[in-house]
Image (tube, coloured by chain):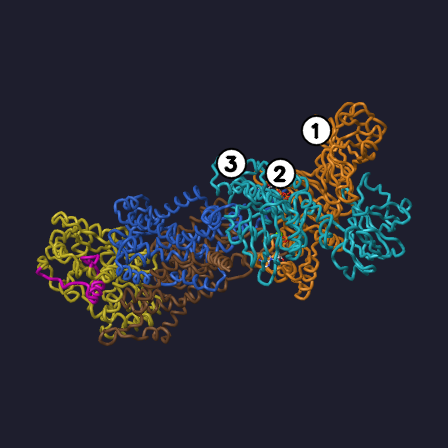
Chain colours: A yellow, B blue, C cyan, D orange, E brown
Amino acid sequence: DLTVTAFGGVWEKSLRTCYVEPFQKKTGKTVDVVLGTPAQWVNQVAANPAKPPIDVFLTLIDGAEDAKARGLVEKIDPAKVPNLADVPEPLRQVVGGDAVVLHYGAAGLAYNEAKIKNPPKTWAEFIERTLKGEWQAALPGINVASTTPTAVIWNFNDALGGKVGDISPVIAKMKALRDSGNVIFWNDVNQFLTQMQSGEADIGIYWDGRAWAARDGGFKSLNFYYPAPGGVVSPTVVQKVKNGSPAAWEFIDFLFSPEPQSCWAAAIQYPVASTKAQYKPEQKARMPKLDEVRWPPFAEILAAMPKWVETWNKDIGR
Amino acid sequence: MTATASWRRLERRLPTLLLLAFVLIFFAFLLAPIVFVVLVSFGDSEIIAFPVTSYSLRWYHRLLEYRPLLDSLWFSLKLAGASAVLAALFGVPAALALARSRSGLADLVSTFLLAPLSIPMILLGIALLYKLSAIGLGISFTSLLIAHTVVSIPYVVRTVVAVYRGIGRNYEEAAAILGASRRQIFTYVTLPLIGSGIFSGMLFAVLISLDNLSLSLFFGSAQTNTLPVVMLSYLQNQFDPAIAAIGTVQMVIALVALLLIERTVGLKFMSSPS
Amino acid sequence: MTQATAKAQSSVTAGEPGLRLRDVCKSFGSVAALQPTSFDVPAGTLCSLLGPSGCGKTTTLRIVAGFELPDAGQVLIRGEDRTYDPPQRRKLGMVFQNYSLFPHMTVAQNVAFGLRMARVNRAETEARTRRMLDIVHLPQHADRYPHQLSGGQQQRVALARSLVTEPSMLLLDEPLGALDKNLREQMQFEIRQLQREIGITTLLVTHDQEEALTMSDMIVVMDRGRILQTGSPAEVYEHPRTRFVSEFLGTSNIIACTVAGAEEGGLRLRLPGDEGSSGFFVADVPVRPVGSTVLVAIRPEHLRIVPAGEAGPSEPRATVSGHVFRGATHVFQLQRPGLDRPLMAYRQITGPVGETALPVGAEVGLSWLPGTARLLEDEPLREDAA
Amino acid sequence: MTQATAKAQSSVTAGEPGLRLRDVCKSFGSVAALQPTSFDVPAGTLCSLLGPSGCGKTTTLRIVAGFELPDAGQVLIRGEDRTYDPPQRRKLGMVFQNYSLFPHMTVAQNVAFGLRMARVNRAETEARTRRMLDIVHLPQHADRYPHQLSGGQQQRVALARSLVTEPSMLLLDEPLGALDKNLREQMQFEIRQLQREIGITTLLVTHDQEEALTMSDMIVVMDRGRILQTGSPAEVYEHPRTRFVSEFLGTSNIIACTVAGAEEGGLRLRLPGDEGSSGFFVADVPVRPVGSTVLVAIRPEHLRIVPAGEAGPSEPRATVSGHVFRGATHVFQLQRPGLDRPLMAYRQITGPVGETALPVGAEVGLSWLPGTARLLEDEPLREDAA
Amino acid sequence: MTAAAATSGRRSRRALGAGLWPVLPAVIFLLLFFLLPLAENGLQSLYVPDAAGKLVFSLDYYARLFTDGYYLGVLGRTIWVSLLATVICILIGYPVAFFMVRHAGRWNGLMIFLLVAPLLTSIIMRTFGWNVILARNGVLNSTLISLGLIERPLRLLQDPSAVIIGLVHVLVPFMVISIAAVLKGIDTRLEEAAELLGASRWRTFREITLPLSLDGIATGAIVVFMLANGSFLTMLLLGGGSVVTLPLLIYQQFLLVQNLGFAAAMGNVLLVLAVISLFLQLRLIRRDGGAS
Ligand SMILES: Nc1ncnc2c1ncn2[C@@H]1O[C@H](COP(=O)(O)OP(=O)(O)OP(=O)(O)O)[C@@H](O)[C@H]1O
Ligand SMILES: Nc1ncnc2c1ncn2[C@@H]1O[C@H](COP(=O)(O)OP(=O)(O)OP(=O)(O)O)[C@@H](O)[C@H]1O
Ligand SMILES: [Mg+2]
Ligand SMILES: [Mg+2]
């Protein structure tokens, strides 16, 4: 009856156990889960706008912005999603109200404790000390869609006093970093871990959830924190596809009910949207508070992307 | 035999031995990164890391537990096989005609049939997604099959043309005079003689199809998920040895498949007689 | 050309010919491999194509088989126009000059191929294959691949493969070229026997004239894409119409003689350098003006030589200038004033080698039986007249 | 084997042999293509390898050329051990049984290849190539590709290619097999002339015994991977040591005779079914017990036949059971009580065909000159004794 | 007259039978599912959004590609990288193919398996493997250092050389198999004939084996060149972005910028370039002297 999107692995498994199965039990409706990536989903819907193959997007924010820009999704109607009452206001205002945050993570610095005893306190300090050559840093390349534009370009630019409309400060700095020889780039989220393990890099920009998972999985010397003024958020959001099954509303509402949200938080180790969700104590300790994370202007960034990408390509080239 | 004789025999074989040494180094190069992948797949650790400290089969159990990887592998194999067969059905007759044709048109047609090789898959994928959706095929196995066949045809055409051109007409003539119909000539004479070409072409098609993320991406659905799409999606959040394990499983499948071919058809068509 | 055809037709048995070529011609680019060519092969007979290398024998066979379309003309098999039929509908057997064995099949599979194509049942296929392999003396090689065979063995497999289907017509392109004499004779015998038994019309290309003479019912002599003469072996051998035919089939002494006079039913000719003598008589030839030069062919085996002392007084003389031992015969070269090329004479060896009574330098007398000297149609070349 | 070798060695000129094989042997898997084989070819001479199809001739050539390593034994060229030298260092010329022309090169390029490899300058290369093409009568085909040539033309290109480099040794694997008799004789002459001029040691494989007899200085007869006899053509032809050699080189009438008595320097033998007669004498043979059966070979050309009326009273009789016309000779088959196979006799044709005085059924008397009947070393087979 | 007409009819039918009609199914299939969709998609490259975001006809994208030095550089680099990978694959792949056909015998199947095995692991995992080997303190560097061959670790990752290594690694099997398939048909006696005529092994190879296997090399070259030409993951993951090629930019336009028009423009340029080089290559390897 319904098709929702998901990423693979634990993500999908948890989606099934925390959301899909209870929902099916409760309503008797069947839910298909389609694995893949945002670009795939958006285009699939765009190719069949009248009879979309997907009803609910669970997607990343850039995919969500794209879907909105192409007019593929509906505004989230609070009337049809009563549980939104438990979701803090900022999390409901993303993508111009065309999406709601389901959970969020934030980018910070992951570093090798064995090599670095005294990690930089702020983003600016990180840049300066990298330039000085205190360590090998691993930064995401321009092609890591969900990370670089926000966690590097916008974040550094901000730390260096630039504006969205003018990224020359960050470009100049990146050039210096690139030429210093103290920076390597990763172009796949998993490559960072490999680089850290093989000793190619000692510190770098990474995501909280993944860093903790690696540490818990056996990479004992990996540590993670949010430098001041804070981590850069990357939310996972929910969208209702235009012309999709009306049952989607029911499902979205179910997503934000407290019990599944707690289950979900425990499974994927990210803070979830519902204020009523329960967390395990050790998770609570690691979790960023909402005010510890910074929200980049996603829509503005998306609009500026063509220019950013071209500039970056030409000047940094990585 | 005297010592010098055996030494001279050896000396005579020296070029071959040097070649053998080169081939061994080559395979060392080819397998080097893969060895670590296989090792890691037997690791006990939660994350992909080397060196592996303790070994276990947990990631293989994990494959059985978390079905999408194996299911999509099976689906991918079916798709790869079907598209390779379809590509052969389209490609082999075309290649046979092209190889023997002397007309200038043949060059143009060849170029056209090989052209799908030269377009970035991602563009072809998106173009096909919209086109096939417009004609109602949408996101389905058929669509995937069409897409994969489009990119498989060039491989079959090219390899078969190359092999067929090296084979004289006289065998087919001999068969014709012995009363073999066109079809029989093809089945009993041409086909075995161009076996190496068809085999390589289809092998390429299968390999490309199995790895074709950019094309498959657009046709992924709950029913039509291919392995590379599932892996990409999996890696979005997780980096564990299950991915190494599925690769190892693929290699085992390849080994078994090749052994089966060896037993049934024989792989001798890839080496010269005697 | 048409004359030759008419003659060939007149000399064959009545009824539809097994094979008829009508003005067939073929060029490869600018190379005219076959000039317009016509001949008939009576059904059930064996016809040999003879001619020097590159004269168009293989091309003719390939047109009959249907591998090449003639540029013009028709190919009739048993009276039906088959010019544009594909090879597989012609029901022919063929041995290719380069064998063309299927490299991916064993010997047995090669031989059985035609039977399999005809869907002969397995037991019979096996039996017939085995029988053919016995005939070509290769029963123990059934499971080898062609590349594991010697040249002659491959050729025999090719022969077996073409015969096993008992085709209605057989095209053999030097099918025994790689075999030694004994084996070749056995194979000739086998081919001939099968051919007669089943009554297969056969076109045989051979460069071995002896083979052509012993095996054929009919011989077609070709040169440079044209047919020079057709007829039975004895006809062609005994009555060569031209110098080329005469020299191509066996050896001939070609002598430019002078017409000394016309007699009842023939001519009286005189050898060069023999002006005084009465000359010799050749019967059944068209009249030529007295004093003109004509070409006469005498076969070396017809030239009888005796030591000069034993020779008749009117017999022409010559000097032994060379002697070669060639198996069963002595070959003598004889010098004679007035001839720029030595004459050749064969003499059967009847005693141990070395015991020849005619050493080099000996003077001998020449003679031949009437009727063994043949007048040729060609005009003498300048060199002959010299 | 060693006996044969010793004999061959004794009969050659002194000095280092051009080619010496010492106990060379070779198997392909379970097929023993060559048993341990030894023979010497004197420098500058032409040696023919003769033997039935599949006896190992090509294998021998390939070992000499260096394409196959022998399983054991040595190959010495001009006295140097070359067993393990790569082919390119042996400076040989070779004509392959299947020609092996380079398909991607024109005729001229094929021929010039060896010269190019030797870095002969362009002008000379062209001149020598052109000269070779003239010799093989293919000057106008220089720019064709091999697949545009007839079989015989391809073979001639192969010949030209092997000769143009004037190699120090020549290996010819049936180099003239696809040529008609006249062309073959011309080519034989050219090969022989070049071979003598340059003094190339040559190993010639041929299935044409006449070619072997006329061209060779020495003949090696092989069978089933073994050497049966070596010697000069006359030696081998006149003194075959075994039935096989006798039958392989030419035709032989093999008759199982009874030893009637030992005489001074020879034996007196009796034909089967001729018990009453005094028999005939064979000289220079080892003594055998009286009453034992021995094999005697008489060549068909040595058997003289005359109508019974003209025959001497003590001459054995036979009946003409068959008659074949074969170019220059009549072949008669003669039946005789006591023999299960008919005897063959040749009679040179001296008059027009058809005029034979010996029709089938006629009774004839047989005779042969002393010294033409040869005692063979073989033991009689059961069938001979029958 | 009618007979003559019938005859010429049969002739022409026979001539047509030997003609090109068997290519039709493939050609039609590709017209429908390759050319047509791409043409529609390609048209997007001719429409550029104006200030108001409305699409208007313009050659802007192409103008950018052909006038901006940066894009021209990328274009050049794309071809250069593919060419380099192709040449290296030929050099490495040929001897392996030769060994496989002439010497491997029953190890043939194993060789094929070993050739395809690396292609069956995901690029992410291969990248991991390369990291283990090529990292600053990876297997290779530590081996070289302990052997005393180098003093300081070589920088092999994040470098164009890693891209080439990675490309060759996955593409060389295609080269090997393409060459082997053709090499197999060459009569070894031809090589023997050449050696006997005094050609060294190398000369024999150059004069005989190589020309006769040109079709196999061409196949391999086409496949490798085209695959290299279309790959971006290797550049990304092993090169760390140090090698930017056109497919990478297409991928960016698609994933980061969602500008399908510009992506299509680059795709069309790539396609045209590749097709031209394909056509030239096919012309080049056409030889008249070949076996027929
Ligand atoms: N590669 C091989 N594998 C197995 N047997 C082989 C191989 N090559 C040759 N033979 C066998 O070895 C024997 C000798 O072969 P060879 O080619 O030397 O014969 P030959 O004397 O040249 O015969 P021909 O006159 O027919 O050419 C033959 O019986 C042949 O079948
Ligand atoms: N494909 C071709 N292109 C050009 N010329 C050719 C082609 N095939 C044959 N020829 C020429 O046509 C002529 C006849 O060739 P054919 O093969 O019929 O000769 P043949 O009588 O069989 O000679 P052989 O006894 O040497 O085999 C030859 O001069 C040959 O060179
Ligand atoms: Mg021929
Ligand atoms: Mg041989």
Q: Secondary structure at mark 3?
A: helix
E146 or A183, nearer to the observer: A183
Q: Which residue is mark 3?
A: C126
Q: Indicate which label's residue lies in the foreground, 2 or 3.
A: 2
Q: Is residue E123 magenta?
A: no
Identity of the residue drawn at 80% across and 36% down: D304
Amino acid type, residue under disc 1 in the picture: Asp
Res. A146 image quadrant: bottom left
The residue wearing badge 2 is C193
Residue type marked 3:
Glu
Q: Where in the image, quadrant-wise, is ligand 2 located?
A: bottom right
**A128 displayed left or right of D18:** left
**1 vs 2, front mark:** 2
Read off the chain for label 1.
Answer: D
- Marks 2 and 3 belong to one chain: yes
Dot 2 falls on a residue whose secondary structure is helix
Q: Which residue is mark 1?
A: D340
Report the side of D156 relative to B151 (left or right): right
How far across and down, in percent of the image, does residue C60 sit?
60, 53
